[in-house]
Amino acid sequence: MVRRRRRRYVVLKVLSSEDIPLQLLVNHLERFREKLFGLLYCRWVNFRIVYVNENARTLVIQTDHRSLPLVRLLTCLVTEVENCKVLLYCLKVTGTLRKAKAQADSMGIQVKYMENLFRELLQAM
């Protein structure tokens, strides 16, 4: 019997030294996946961006449970996009899209106090 792949939704907070469009970041993630894992192993890292909140600067990435550690590794290794320092912080991993969207919309307010710490980290990079 074939087991169905379980979906996971990763909620990411995007912090950058300058305001960059999130679509530019999404394109950079796709290219960086091919660069990091190569064309042969790129198919093992399945992910797609399903929700973008420009106001809260959050993304929701859909992946499966097998690719989740590799997606987390990929998001940790992205530090620069178009000569702009970027920090992607994983806020939450959920199993449903509805919970992920709710977290992405509400986390923009809840993480506001942590942004000063992240700004210091960006300056140190």
Image (cartoon, rainbow, N blue to C red):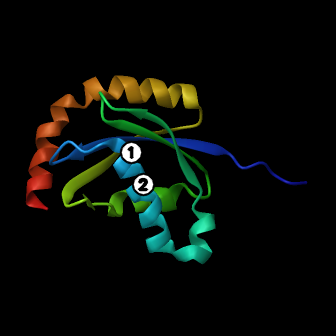
Residue, x 49% and y 31% (percent of image)? 100
Residue, x 62% and y 65% (percent of image)? 44
Label 1: how many Cα within 10 Å (few below 14, some 14–19, many 20+)? few
Check whether the beta carbons of the residues at disc 2 and disc 1 lie within 8 A of each other: yes
Vertically, is 105 above or below 22?
above
In the rendered view, does 54 fall on the left or right side of 116? right
Vertically, is 87 above or below 35?
above
Q: Position of residue 89 (x, y in %)?
A: 32, 47
Q: Amino acid at mark 1?
A: Gln
Q: Secondary structure at mark 2?
A: helix
Instruction: Determine which quarter of the picture holds residue 103.
Output: top left
Vertically, is 23 above or below 52?
below
In the rendered view, does 19 fall on the left or right side of 41? left
In the rendered view, does 115 fall on the left or right side of 29? left
Image quadrant where one finds the N terminus: bottom right
- What label does residue 27 carry, if any? 2
Q: Secondary structure at mark 1?
A: helix
Instruction: Determine which quarter of the picture holds residue 81.
Output: bottom left
C-alpha distance separating marks 2 and 1: 6 Å
Residue, x 26% and y 24% (percent of image)? 109
Instruction: Determine which quarter of the picture holds residue 98.
Output: top right
Q: Amino acid at mark 2?
A: Asn
Image quadrant where one finds the C terminus: bottom left
Q: Position of residue 70 (x, y in %)?
A: 50, 62
- Residue under label 1, please give it: 23
